[in-house]
Image: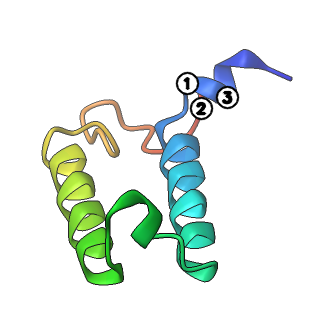
Amino acid sequence: MNKSKLKNYGLWVSIFAFIGLILGNYGLYAVIGLTAVSYKMLVDAFLGILTIAGILSNPNNGTGYIDK
């Protein structure tokens, strides 16, 4: 596997979103001390911070989510 793909921020956001989806499907939010509403608020805040910081989509670079 090409290790440069592991540097793609979109990949990591997708992986963590998938983990959250699995936790929600099996009702495991309570195990980590969250509810579905608090999990959604946490994810929205985190993605908002990443977007504002320009980590998820950097318009200056011009490549967006494309790997180098």
Cβ–Cβ under 8 Å for marks 2 and 3? yes
Screen quadrant of the C terminus: top right
Cβ–Cβ under 8 Å for marks 1 and 2? yes
Q: Quadrant of residue 29?
A: bottom left
Q: Total label count?
A: 3
Q: Nearer the viewer, residue 30 or 38?
A: 30
Which amino acid lies under the numbered mark 1 shown in the image of this protein?
Answer: Lys
**Residue designated by label 3:** 5
**Residue designated by label 2:** 67
Screen quadrant of the N terminus: top right
Cβ–Cβ under 8 Å for marks 1 and 3? yes
Which amino acid lies under the numbered mark 2 shown in the image of this protein?
Answer: Asp
Q: Residue at x 37, y 37 (%)?
A: 62
State the separation of the CA atoms marked 1 and 2.
Answer: 8 Å
Q: Quadrant of residue 19?
A: bottom right
Chain-order first, disc 1 or disc 2: 1
